Image (cartoon, rainbow, N blue to C red):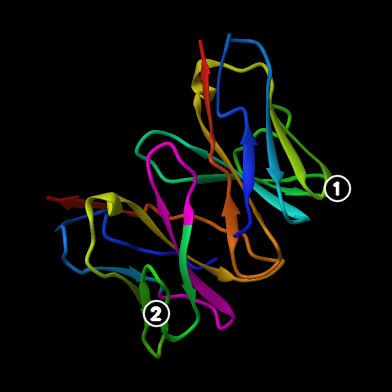
Amino acid sequence: LAKTTQPISMDSYEGQEVNITCSHNNIATNDYITWYQQFPSQGPRFIIQGYKTKVTNEVASLFIPADRKSSTLSLPRVSLSDTAVYYCLVGLSGGSYIPTFGRGTSLIVHP
Amino acid sequence: GAVVSQHPSRVICKSGTSVKIECRSLDFQATTMFWYRQFPKQSLMLMATSNEGSKATYEQGVEKDKFLINHASLTLSTLTVTSAHPEDSSFYICSAGQGGYEQYFGPGTRLTVT
């Protein structure tokens, strides 16, 4: 399984764009990149998933360079409610996928 | 989206007793479910992979005789913490997928062993 490295913590302010980068140098050809959000005492919540280039949904964008050795989760105009821990996971989607969590990034959004 | 539930949401038990935690996929079938344990301010640690109709696959260091997993149907997996001790106090989370792109996580179960 590809190991992931993220910053341990980040601080931001309401209304700003936040970019969290995850390194996954030994990502395999068939691996997808998935980001989850977790609030205290809750299960993780799916944010976005991608394989290459750029993916956008209603809450975030995911940027993946051509070599796929890193990825960046972009949260536009964060609010206080975006304060959470964000996890980057790498693995093969489908039946053989075993979601394994790294340390995650604790994002704190200030007023 | 798909929903995974856990029951109970929190439980307090005495040392030496056993506790069962249920994980259900409410609107989809899951041949595979995963069980995690999370200590305060730490990441989720995978404990085992629960396979419907067969034995669970445990991660290294997880005692299979202490953490009994049963995946009796395509919508239900149970984790039983046997002879619980205070060090087993933790947040237990399950997840399930549909074999596609997303894993759906349960809300978690807070276990406190006194």
Q: Amino acid at mark 2?
A: Lys
- Compared across the picture, whether A17 is left or right of B50 comes to left
The answer to which image quadrant residue A37 occupies is bottom left
- Compared across the picture, whether A24 is left or right of A110 comes to right
The residue located at (47%, 50%) in the rendering is A44
The answer to which image quadrant residue A47 occupies is bottom left
Q: Which of the chains bears the disc numbered 1? A: B
Q: Nearer the viewer, residue A99 or A60?
A: A60
Asked if the magenta segment contains residue A26, the reply would be yes
Q: Quadrant of the N terminus of chain A?
A: bottom right
The residue located at (62%, 59%) in the rendering is A98
Q: Which of the chains bears the disc numbered 2? A: A
Q: Amino acid at mark 1?
A: Ser
Q: Nearer the viewer, residue B49 or B63?
A: B49
- Compared across the picture, whether A33 is left or right of B19 comes to left
The residue located at (56%, 29%) in the rendering is B9
- Residue that carries the numbered disc 2 in the rendered image: A69
Residue A106, numbered circle: none
Q: Position of residue A26 (x, y in %)?
A: 46, 75
Q: Secondary structure at mark 2?
A: loop
Q: Position of residue B67 (x, y in %)?
A: 68, 31
Q: Secondary structure at mark 1?
A: loop
Instruction: Say if B44 sits above or below A50 in the image.
Output: above
Q: Gap between marks 2 and 1, in whole Å? A: 36 Å
The residue segment tinted magenta is: A25-45
Q: Nearer the viewer, residue B105 or B43?
A: B105
Q: Position of residue A70 (x, y in %)?
A: 36, 76
Q: Residues within 10 Å of mark 1 (few under 14, many from 20)?
A: few
Instruction: Say if A15 sits above or below A67 in the image.
Output: above
- Residue that carries the numbered disc 1 in the rendered image: B54
